[in-house]
Image (cartoon, rainbow, N blue to C red):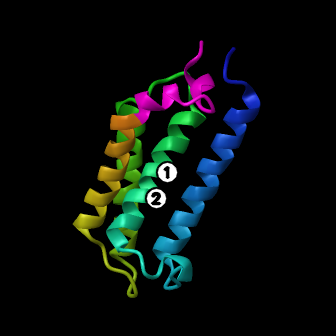
Amino acid sequence: MKFSQRPILFFRLSFILILAMIFYLATTDVGPSLLQNTNDKVQHLLAFGALAFLADFSFPKQSFNREKFFSLVAIGILIEFIQSFLPYREASFFDILADTLGIAIYAFFYRQLKHLPILEKRWRT
């Protein structure tokens, strides 16, 4: 059984929504009160790990390849570039490293996800 169009649409819309939320939070001076006590680098790692998951499941015909990996890294770099022009934000190389680590953690573990019954359809052909 193939991954049907409905879940693909769900993952793509989720990717766009999460990406929009990340851009909003990264470019405004308003911080989320829910995550106030969480380390900034942990937030970056989790956000980009989630983006990697959503990007991978949005395009299930391809494995989690270089294009997906480096496209997400480029998004992290773009966010930091934009932040460098904002007076209430500051760009950080360590944020880019945390973003990349979140993506790399997903890349390292994504093959193990095929053993989870709820996600196994993603790898069926």
The residue under the point 69% across, 14% down is 1
Residue span colored magenta: 110-125
Decide: is 100 above or below 116: below
Looking at the rendered structure, the secondary structure element under dot 2 is helix
Q: Position of residue 18 (x, y in %)?
A: 58, 57
Residue 47: which disc? 2
Identified by mark 2, the residue type is: Ala
In the image, taking residue 46 as reference, residue 54 lies left or right, namely right
- Tell which of 88 and 25 is nearer to you: 25
- Tell which of 33 and 117 is nearer to you: 117
Q: Is 114 part of what is drawn in magenta? A: yes
Q: Position of residue 3 (x, y in %)?
A: 67, 23
Q: CA distance from mark 1 to mark 2?
A: 5 Å
Decide: is 102 above or below 112: below
Identified by mark 1, the residue type is: Ala
Question: Do the numbered discs 1 and 2 sit on residues whose CB atoms are within 8 Å?
Answer: yes
Q: Residue furthest right?
A: 6
Residue 50: which disc? 1
Q: Quadrant of the C terminus?
A: top right
Looking at the rendered structure, the secondary structure element under dot 1 is helix
Decide: is 18 above or below 4: below
Decide: is 106 above or below 114: below
In the image, taking residue 16 as reference, residue 10 lies left or right, namely right
- Please tell me in which quadrant of the rendered image residue 109 appears: top left
Q: Is 99 part of what is drawn in magenta? A: no
Q: Position of residue 50 (x, y in %)?
A: 49, 51
Residue 84: which disc? none
* Label 1 neighbour load within 10 Å: few <14, some 14-19, many 20+: some
Main SS, magenta region, reads helix
